[in-house]
Amino acid sequence: MHEGRLRELIATRVHRPEAVAQAAAARQRPNTVIGGHGKLMMIAADHPARGALRAGDRPLAMANRADLLDRLCLALSRPGVNGVLGTPDVLEDLLLLGALEGKVVVGSMNRGGLAGTAFEIDDRFTSYDASRIAASGFEGGKMLVRIDPEDHGTVRTLASCAHAITDLAGHRLMAMVEPFISHRVDGRVRNELTAEAMIRAMSVAAGLGTTSAYTWLKVPVVEDMERALEATTLPALILGGEVTDDQGAAFASWRKALALPTVQGLVIGRSLLYPPGDDVAGAVDAAVGLL
């Protein structure tokens, strides 16, 4: 993003804040959440609002907003990418930049469980709510559900997510639910990435809210993925997780998961926005090629 475009974006925010709502109202919406390749290929960028700025060995990779927007605009411009997930600050920048035309847009909802905090599991809804997602003309809302058997904050997160799923369904909007069984290890929250843990987490998530009609699950690849996904009939999307030096192995695991009947696409963030070698276009095109 050259300096002139960045200054124009900032000036719009200063002098014409109403331009955000105008851009949302004028946005060309997609006819379906499924792309021409038969899947949903979405770029995720809701990490900064939870204080999670690391990508691979770069602790503050996502701290430069102009650089992040450059990477997002490039990723969204690649053929086959038909969606984006983010918080209001990121999505509204993209709206003002004209990068969301025809894209599936999903607003991230609960960002209160800040990374590395004592209250991380009590993941309150501090970002989008269902009414604002609907008013913005977006296609759905995403929520993180980490279930820690030893943390009382879990039950508040479960109840809040149940209400959000119900509210989104009332607007006939997708509820994208990302469930994990989590534990504190040496003071830090770690997700249990086993088939057994994912079966339990998905089973709990699928039952949240007054209807599951609009619920999709966002899940990691785990060993014995086929057995894990036998736990639900809900549509599932594969998340990318942490950036890894062995990108080939990550791609191979996504390809294998995409062959399962419930898997309807990919929601990948840092792995494509900050890939080894920093070739964003190449990484995105390779991921689209899996579809």
Image (cartoon, helix red, strand yellow):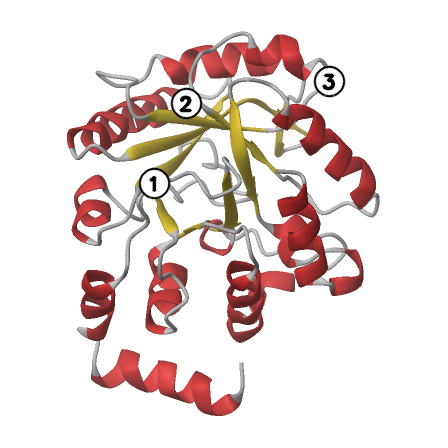
Residue at (59, 56) in percent of width and height: 53
Residue 290 position by quadrant = top right
Q: Residues within 10 Å of mark 3 (few under 14, many from 20)?
A: few
Label 3 sits on residue: 223
Report how far apart the C-alphas of labels 3 and 1 lie in the structure.
31 Å
Q: Amino acid at mark 1?
A: Thr
Report how far apart the C-alphas of labels 2 and 1 lie in the structure.
34 Å
Residue placed most toward the observer, 10 or 79: 79
| Residue 202 against residue 49 in the figure, above or below | above
Whether residue 53 is visible: yes
Which marked residue is nearer to the observer: mark 3 or mark 2? 3
Residue at (54, 50) in percent of width and height: 80
Residue at (27, 83) in percent of width and height: 14
- Measured as percent of width and height from the top left, residue 230 is found at 55, 8
Label 1 sits on residue: 32
- Left or right of residue 217, residue 224 in this image: right
Label 2 sits on residue: 154
Whether tag 3 and tag 2 are in contact, CB under 8 A, the answer is: no
- Measured as percent of width and height from the top left, residue 86 is found at 42, 52
